[in-house]
Amino acid sequence: MKPNANVAKVATLVSESSRATILTILLDGRFHPASDLAYMAGITPQTASYHLSKMTHANVVDDSLIQQGLIYEKEKGYQVTNKGENFFQGLQIDLDRLRKKRRMFCGKCLDWSERRHHISRALGNALLKKFLEYNWIQHAPQSRALKVTAAGTEGFKH
């Protein structure tokens, strides 16, 4: 697997507990207004908007995957390229199995507050599970938040 400098940016973003909580909530693939995210994360709407803005402006996951030619945007989702097939195979993500699931394979989820899309559905969930399996991230105790581990800090660099 080739190193990806943008992964460190993602790690930095999710290392803040409120942002990690918001990202965890968004993994369900449904639309959530910023006010609902704030309530669920236990923060003020202004704080939620700030965190959403930080994550949207970073836009490192989708942009990085697109810029590297691993995925490209379609009307209702993303398509994995041949290069992307090899990349995800290197992460030991079985794309054929994901494509056979009832859940959409690689969707776009609209962030209503920012009017921008992020990757979702089966592939997004598989990435989350893989990062947990590698112990690159872990659930914070008594919270839905995620935090980047020391192993993740190193792993995301490569």
Image (cartoon, grey):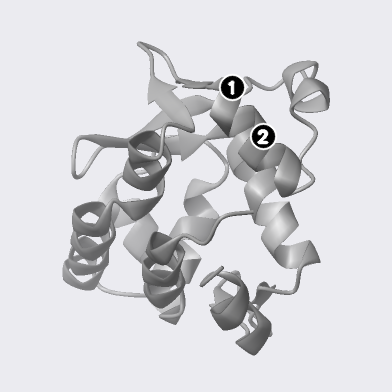
Residue 32 is left or right of residue 104, and the answer is left
How many tags in the picture?
2
Residue 114 in percent (x, y) is at: 18, 43
Q: Quadrant of the N terminus?
A: bottom right
Local packing at callout 1 (Cα closer than 10 Å; few below 14, some 14-19, many 20+) is few
- Position of residue 69 relative to residue 133, above or below, is above
Question: In the figure, residue 139 lies in which quadrant?
Answer: bottom right
Of the residues shown, which amino acid type is indicated by label 2? Asn
Q: Please tell me which residue lies in front, 22 or 154.
A: 154
Residue at left offset 45%, top offset 63%: 7
Residue 8 in percent (x, y) is at: 43, 71
- The residue tagged 1 is 82
Task: Give the SS element for disc 2.
Answer: helix
Residue 131 in percent (x, y) is at: 68, 62
Residue at left offset 25%, top offset 58%: 58
- The residue tagged 2 is 86
Q: CA distance from mark 2 to mark 1?
A: 7 Å
Q: Quadrant of the C terminus?
A: bottom right
Residue projecting furthest to the top: 75
